Image (tube, grey):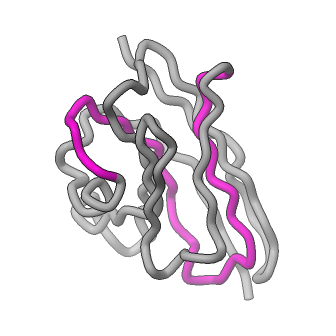
């Protein structure tokens, strides 16, 4: 059974940094993508947007709004996915979710196909104050 458990969220001031972690069990990375999505407070699940994605080879993709500020990475030995977030802005405030899929896709494709991710964590809240 696949389980994804996020941690690392919190409240920071604009310009600060956070590192999110996603502990993964029951899932193998081979040939698949994992990603981070976020859902702003005023938006429902359908408003969830792709933030960053990584495939089994380590190729990555980012939403334009976070390029140059966020970095996705994974540690296969620890079965953990990370999202390093620097230069945080108030508009980054959201619930952040880790997700995994068994479907074959590129990281760029993954950012726009939330519906094809079958495994989700419970989310971790990130709040950025100005």
Q: If the image is split into quadrants, where does the N terminus sit?
A: top left
Q: Is residue 24 left or right of residue 90?
A: left
Residue depicted at x 58% and y 48%: 124
In the figure, 18 relative to 58: above or below?
below
Quarter holding residue 51: bottom left
Q: For the magenta stretch, what is the residue range?
A: 78-106
Q: If the image is split into quadrants, where does the C terminus sit?
A: bottom right
In terms of depth relative to the viewer, which is nearer, 93 or 102?
Answer: 102
In the figure, 12 relative to 91: above or below?
above
Total count of labels: 0
Check the image and name the residue furthest to the bottom.
130
Residue depicted at x 66% and y 82%: 89
Residue depicted at x 59% and y 23%: 79
Quarter holding residue 67: bottom right
In terms of depth relative to the viewer, which is nearer, 49 or 52?
Answer: 52
Residue depicted at x 37% and y 62%: 50
In terms of depth relative to the viewer, which is nearer, 38 or 58?
Answer: 58
Image coordinates of residue 125 in percent, x first then y, are 59, 56
Residue 102 counted in the magenta span:
yes
Residue 60 counted in the magenta span:
no
In the figure, 100 relative to 83: above or below?
above
Image coordinates of residue 19 in percent, x first then y, are 73, 53
Image coordinates of residue 18 in percent, x first then y, are 75, 59
Image coordinates of residue 33 in percent, x first then y, are 36, 40
In terms of depth relative to the viewer, which is nearer, 58 or 117?
Answer: 58
In the figure, 85 relative to 98: above or below?
below
Q: Is residue 122 left or right of residue 33?
A: right
């Amino acid at each position: 059974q696949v389980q994804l458990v996020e941690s690392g969220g919190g409240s920071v001031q604009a310009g600060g940094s956070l590192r999110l972690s996603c502990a993964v069990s029951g899932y193998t990375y081979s040939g698949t993508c994992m990603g981070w999505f976020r859902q702003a407070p005023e938006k429902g699940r359908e408003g969830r947007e792709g933030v960053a994605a990584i495939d089994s080879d380590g190729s990555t993709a980012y939403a334009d709004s976070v390029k140059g500020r966020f970095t996705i990475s994974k540690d296969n030995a620890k079965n953990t996915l990370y999202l390093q977030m620097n230069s945080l802005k108030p508009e980054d405030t959201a619930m952040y979710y880790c997700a995994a899929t068994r479907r074959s896709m590129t990281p760029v494709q993954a950012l726009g196909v939330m519906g094809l991710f079958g495994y989700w964590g419970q989310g971790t809240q990130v709040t950025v104050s100005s």
